[in-house]
Amino acid sequence: MNFKITIEKRQTSKIAEFYPENIGFGKIFTDHMFLANWDGLEWKDARIVPYGPIPLSPATSAIHYGQSIFEGMKAFSHSHDKGIHLFRPLENWMRFNISAERMVMPYVPKELYIDGLKTLLKLESAWVPKNEKGSLYIRPFMFATDDFIGVTPSKTFIFVIFCCPVGPYYSKPLKIKVEETYSRSAPGGVGYVKCAGNYGGAMFPTLQAQKEGYDQVLWTDPLTHTLIEETGTSNLFAVINGEVITPPLSATLLSGITRNSVIKGLRHLGYEVNERPLSILALKNALNDGSLAELFITGTAATLVGIQGFGHRDAYFDVMDQGNNAVSTHIKTWLDNVRHGNIPDELDWNVKI
Ligand code: COI
């Protein structure tokens, strides 16, 4: 399948207003965006236009019923070949279509997703930060565009990709609150897909946790609230007695691509990594007997960040006080070096545009 992509360029680039030293996260948008429309039968009108508002009817069904999915991915500037490289883009494309299927949305062919991405990035290459802390965050998303108030799957959709040059999402180790009242998802639900509602539904409990002095919630399983799942933005890893543990994938857990990269990367570096259930009790016991060395989270936006400590009920347990960051520092440095092209890409993850 071949999609002809038309390009309408912005007359003057906004890049002169861009200061890469202090970019923060998600507030600066590049000059252009990619769009394509599903008319109920096929994808058409693949185009790149200046970044800007998308006119919508107030009855747009995504706004009312949440038929909306997204991805988060990154591109990096490599000094050795002066090229721009996407990190594992096919993994994001595959996960996007898993989300699309669950949310009754059309399949997005590889050619549309990857060619749209590459064409956009070639145009925006000057926006990819050159420093080691920066990257270009890419947000592909799709939402239902029928203007119809009945609760039924939309027939029409729009697929959009835009980009933001970003620095770190979190600037310091996090304090997280073990959540036992609210649930992010439930068996049979949509926890394993990247749909907009998963994030909107998490905002109230997250705000509660933040009022109590925490940065994020640590979700627990919805049935017993005893097993660790993930945080609001990322997957979680623990290092106990030298074993790296992360909760296994399930219907209620998002299959993080950074999670998968960290598992594969750690194994490549010789660590023992197991995907197995981890309870709050086991975590507290490991902290008490001194065997819990580290907790850290992984995500595309978050990259890899250490957990300072966690709150459970009325008590706070500091992990960094007694632990060390040996494993997370090792894998973070290795992963950053792979993504920035500083070391050989032995697992074949970078895709040059
Ligand atoms: C990502 O890590 O890319 C995400 O989509 C998480 C989001 C909360 C920023």
Image (spheres, rainbow, N blue to C red):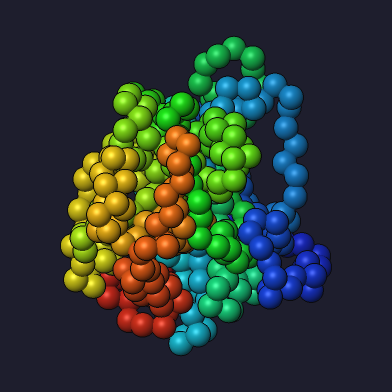
Q: Residue at x 32, y 81 (%)?
A: 344
Image-quadrant location for residue 178: top left
Counting from the top left corner in percent of width and height, residue 14 is at 78, 67
Q: Residue at x 20, y 53 (%)?
A: 274
Q: Residue at x 63, y 59 (%)?
A: 25
The answer to whether 152 is drawn above or below residue 261 in the figure is: above
Counting from the top left corner in percent of width and height, residue 325 is at 37, 68
Most extreme residue toward the bottom is 80
Q: Is residue 108 visible?
A: no
Toward the viewer: 240 or 329? 240
The answer to whether 52 is drawn above or below residue 10 in the figure is: above
Q: Residue at x 56, y 27 (%)?
A: 66
Image-quadrant location for residue 142: top right
Image-quadrant location for residue 96: top left
Q: Is residue 128 visible?
A: yes
Toward the viewer: 107 or 242? 242
Counting from the top left corner in percent of width and height, residue 268 is at 22, 70
9 left or right of 247 in image = right
144 left or right of 266 in image = right
The answer to whether 227 is drawn above or below residue 116 in the figure is: above
Toward the viewer: 328 or 156? 328
Number of numbered discs: 0
The answer to whether 37 is drawn above or below residue 300 in the figure is: above
Counting from the top left corner in percent of width and height, residue 220 is at 37, 35
